[in-house]
Image (cartoon, rainbow, N blue to C red):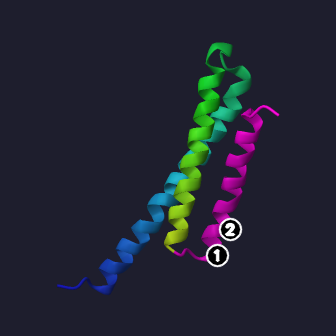
Amino acid sequence: ESLSAEDKAKIEATALNVPVSLLKLCHEQSTAVANFLPRCNPNITSDAKVCIHLLAGAGRAAYQTVLVNQPKEEVKAELKPLLADLAAHEKLVLPE
């Protein structure tokens, strides 16, 4: 039995929305950790920095999944600044 066009559209929308939502969540949490770092207990700053790297990696992986789903240019344009922010957060915590 074949799926209806409506069911296929729902599946495609979900396939795109899940990684988009994940990237947005990674960005939100990475921003929160980056903003917390200046006030962070010095004994746990390395944990917070690792968190930023993990969130950045997860965000990039989610974006890769977004690309597999061939999103509209507007979606990519919305997400690219989030990727840039994730990279900036990582640069902030990496020693020169």
Query: Looking at the image, do the residues carrying marks 1 and 2 touch, with CB atoms under 8 Å apart?
Result: yes
Q: Amino acid at mark 2?
A: Ala
The residues colored magenta run 70-96
Residue 84 among magenta residues:
yes
Q: Amino acid at mark 1?
A: Glu
Q: Which mark is residue 65?
A: none
User: x, y percentage for residue 56?
Assistant: 61, 45
Figure quadrant of residue 48: top right
User: x, y percentage for residue 46?
Assistant: 64, 24
Q: From the viewer's perspective, is 27 left or right of 8?
A: right
Figure quadrant of residue 90: top right
| Residue that appears at 27% across and 85% down | 4
Instruction: Point out the image quarter for the N terminus.
Output: bottom left
The Cα atoms of the two marked residues, 1 and 2, are separated by: 6 Å
Residue position for label 2: 77
Would you place residue 51 above or below residue 17 in this image? above
| Residue that appears at 70% across and 32% down | 35
Q: Which residue is at the front of the view, 53 or 17?
A: 53
| Residue that appears at 43% across and 71% down | 13
Would you place residue 65 above or below residue 52 in this image? below
Report the number of discs: 2
| Residue that appears at 55% across and 69% down | 67
Would you place residue 94 above or below residue 11 in this image? above
Residue 46 among magenta residues:
no
